[in-house]
Amino acid sequence: MKIQISLMVLLLSSGSLFAKEINNTSSEAEKIGYSFGYLMGRSNADTLKDLDLDAFSQGLKTAAAGQKSSLSDEEMTQVLTQYKRQSDAKELIVLKQKAEENAKAGKAFLQENAKKPGVKTTKSGLQYLVLKEGKGKSPSANSNVRVHYEGRLIDGTVFDSSIARQQPVDFRTTQVITGWTEGLQLMKVGAKYRFFIPADLAYGQIGSGDIIEPNSTLIFDIELLEIIK
């Protein structure tokens, strides 16, 4: 669970949970306690929604007061272990459903996108659109390159952008997702391409972070600035 126990002692109050309305005329101690409680509740909403908050408050106050728990350590470990198993099982079901939805949406998107003018599809399923041609050499599968890029989901959500940071990145072409490794070798220095990358050439069924969900099809605008010797 995400809840930070070290901060929860600041939620203690003599009355019941939410028994008193807190506003800007309340005491400093009340406003501090309310602020910690609200921010903690907001950042842990998914966990707290399944808990009995009255029992949660009782356990918090008992522990902070140094009193003996009404449940043994073994009993608490057992019930929390079971709770975690149930939560993990629910999460796996949700992730599986989300992965199936993303796979279906990605497939439909790529099928329609392949029909658009200028879009080419490689044998692997990678799609690309030339935004600007380059000159000179193309990188190999083991080159060091410097690029600017912006990554988006198919709904347009930007999840990463060196362009916004105004800071290009250097890397070896084997250190990135398969779609990038293949796509960069199609480019020449100075070129700018838009790549439409199927999930199996990106982060697959694992996804990446909170934004790139399992089986996400990704869109990248990549400008090849330099092949680094």
Image (cartoon, grey):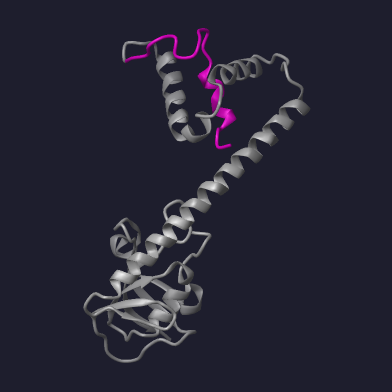
Is residue 69 found inside the magenta-colored segment of the image? no
Q: Residue at coordinates 53% horizontally, 8% vertically from top-left?
A: 14
Q: Is residue 148 above or below residue 86?
A: below
Residue 209 visible, this angle = no
On screen, residue 158 above or below 129: above
Tell which of 112 and 61 is nearer to you.
112
Location of residue 53 in the rendering, given as x and y in whole percent from the top left corner: 53, 20
- Position in image of residue 56 (x %, y %): 58, 21
At 63% from the left and 38% from the top, the residue drawn is 86
Give the camera-side residue of 109 and 132.
109
Which portion, as a residue range, is magenta?
Answer: 1-23
Question: In this rendering, would 116 be left or right of 211?
Answer: left
Q: Is residue 113 visible?
A: yes
Residue 22 magenta-drawn?
Answer: yes
> Residue 95: percent from the left, percent from the top?
51, 51
- Percent across and percent down for residue 192 are 27, 77
Residue depicted at x 73% and y 20%:
71
